[in-house]
Amino acid sequence: MNYLAIVLAYLVGAIPFGLLMGKIAGVDVRDSGSRNIGATNVTRLAGKKFGIFTLFLDVAKGLLPMVIAQAAGLASDTVLLCGAAAFVGHCYPVYLRFRGGKGVATALGVFLFLDLIAVVGGVLLFVIAVAVTGYVSLGSLLAAAMVSLLVWLRHGLGTYFYLALFIAGLIWLKHHENIGRLFRGEEKSFKKKKKSAAEE
C-alpha cells in the first residue's frame, strides 16, 4: 500500500477550484447562493464560463490521481483508494477547515475511471430528472445511485462496487439539506425560475 500516493490524492482533491474560480470572478461563492464551492453555485454566482472551468477541474481531480497511480504501477487497491481520497478531499478539504463541496463532479471523475458505461447511464438519468423536475440536486442523487447500481451489475460485489457505493452514500449524506428541502417543496428549481421569468 502506497500511503504517500493516497495522501497526495487527498491533497489534490482538497484543492477548492470552485472557490478559486469565484475569487477570479470577484465573488466568494461561500457567501451567496447555496454557499457551496461546487460548479452549480459557481455558475449561479460567477457565470457559465467559470462554472464550466470548475466542473472540468473538479472532475479532473477525481480522475487524474487514479490514472497517474495506475500508470505508476501501483496496486489496484491503492489506485482505488486514491480515488476515494481525492473525493473525500473535495468534500472535506483541509485547506478550508474541512468544509467542502458535495462531491458530485469529483465523484464523476472517479466513476469515469471505474466504468464509462455506468457513467453514461447515470448522466442520462441526471439529464432526464433535471429536465422533468428542474432539480439539479435530485438529478445528482439519482445519478449517484444509478452509477452504483450499474457498477454492481457489471462488476459484481467487489472493490469497484464498494468504492462506488461509498461515494454515492457520501453524496447523499452531503445532500441531506437538499433532501429535506425536496420533501418540503422548498428546493430551488430551474423550472420554477423559467416559469417566474415568463410570468414577469
Image (cartoon, rainbow, N blue to C red):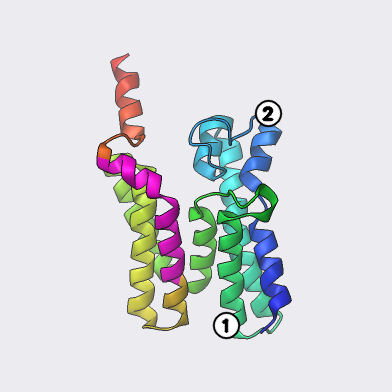
Tag 2's secondary structure? Answer: loop
Residue 144 falls in image quadrant: bottom left
In the image, is residue 115 part of the stretch drawn in magenta?
no
Q: What residue is at 65 percent from the left and 64 percent from the top? A: 10
Tag 1's secondary structure? Answer: helix
Disc marking residue 26: 2
Position in image of residue 90 (x %, y %): 59, 56
Residue 162 versus residue 14 in the image, above or below: below
Q: What residue is at 61 percent from the left and 44 percent from the top? A: 18
Which of the image's four quarters has the C terminus?
top left
Camera-side residue of 22 and 89: 89
Q: What residue is at 34 percent from the left and 37 percent from the top? A: 187
Q: Is residue 76 visible?
A: yes
Position in image of residue 103 (x %, y %): 51, 55
**Magenta span of residues:** 164-183
Please, what is the three-letter code of the amino acid marked with disc 2? Answer: Gly
Residue 146 versus residue 128 in the image, above or below: below
Residue 20 falls in image quadrant: top right
Please, what is the three-letter code of the amino acid marked with disc 1? Answer: Asp
Residue at the disc numbered 1: 77
In the image, is residue 175 part of the stretch drawn in magenta?
yes
Q: Earlier in the sequence, mark 1 or mark 2?
A: 2
Residue 167 versus residue 105 in the image, above or below: below
Q: Is residue 12 left or right of residue 190?
A: right
- The secondary structure that dominates the magenta segment is helix
> How far separated are the C-alphas under marks 1 and 2?
41 Å
Q: Is residue 138 left or right of residue 113?
A: left
Position in image of residue 61 (x %, y %): 63, 59
Q: Is residue 130 visible?
A: no
Within-10-Å neighbours for mark 2: few <14, some 14–19, many 20+ = few
Within-10-Å neighbours for mark 1: few <14, some 14–19, many 20+ = few
